[in-house]
Amino acid sequence: MSIKAFLTGTLVMFSMLAFSQATKGKVMYDVFVSSDDPSVSAYVDQMENSLLEIFFSGNKTRTNFHMGEMMTTMTISVKEQDTVLVLLDGMMGKIAMKVTEDDMDDERRMALEKQEVELIEGETKEVMGYTCKKAIIIGADGNESTVWYTEEIAPAHREGEYLNEEIPGLPLEMTAKYGKMDMKIVAFEFKGKIKKEDEVFSLEVPEGFVLKTMEEMKSFGR
């Protein structure tokens, strides 16, 4: 075997190893919210400087959504567990909820069941140095969301608001419409390591948070 062939084989082996290792990490995203409707301008202003973080490792995922000046929502999910821990930190104080599928209302359940995902062939885009493929998510209300995802980073557990098991990779750019507002989420940093991993993915209610049921939370709006 020539040295050139040996080096080529070695480089291929290491590139495959690097590809297979990108199943753990933390991604940070800028969140941009806009609207042409004056009735939601105050909300849009409060969402300025919003930030999204997604952590993933094996069968565990966590999202932290820092919603500008309003609040931070954190969601921790472990694949084998039937309970998702949701943490809210904002104007209502520090609130924790342990949510199961039984807590999901019929409207939300139907929306998820009727959601369709279409993987678009032949369209690519570079985001943060990664080659991304395009996917379209069509909601039950007919609204479309566009996702640009990379297969070079692939969380094993892809469920929740921003990860989808039908999309074979990690979203690095997402655009969607929420009511009268347009939202664009764009990744700007990826780290392949997670500090204090056990703490990040813990399903225990953190100190200072008050545990509430879904019924108690619904009563706040009545």
Image: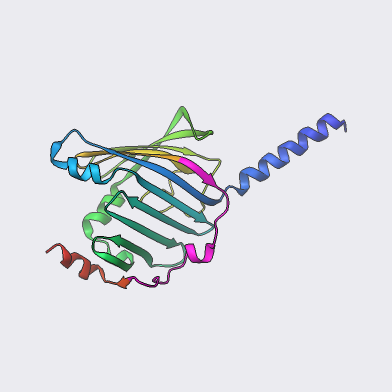
Residue 194 colored magenta? yes
Report whether residue 57 is seen.
Answer: yes
Q: Quadrant of the C terminus?
A: bottom left
Farthest residue toward the top? Answer: 122
The answer to which of 140 and 98 lies nearer the viewer is 98
Q: Main secondary structure of the magenta part?
A: loop
Q: How is the image coloured?
A: rainbow
Above or below, 31 relative to 62: above
Quarter-of-image position of residue 12: top right
* Number of numbered callouts drawn: 0
Residue 20: percent from the left, percent from the top? 62, 47
What residue is shown at x 21% (from left), y 70% (from top)?
Answer: 216
Q: Quadrant of residue 71?
A: bottom left
Q: Residue at x 19, y 65 (%)?
A: 218
In the image, is 97 to the left or to the right of 166?
left
Residue drawn at x 17%, y 42% as measured from the top left: 40
In screen coordinates, is 136 left or right of 70?
A: right
Q: Nearer the viewer, residue 104 or 60?
A: 60
- Residue furthest to the right in view is 1
Question: Residue 22's spot in the image, x, y percent?
Answer: 58, 47
Q: Residue at x 39, y 54 (%)?
A: 64
The residue segment tinted magenta is: 188-209
* Residue 69 percent location from the top left of the image: 28, 51
Image quarter hosting the N terminus: top right
Residue 93 counted in the magenta span? no
**Residue 160 in sight:** no
Coordinates of residue 133 in the picture (x, y in percent): 47, 34
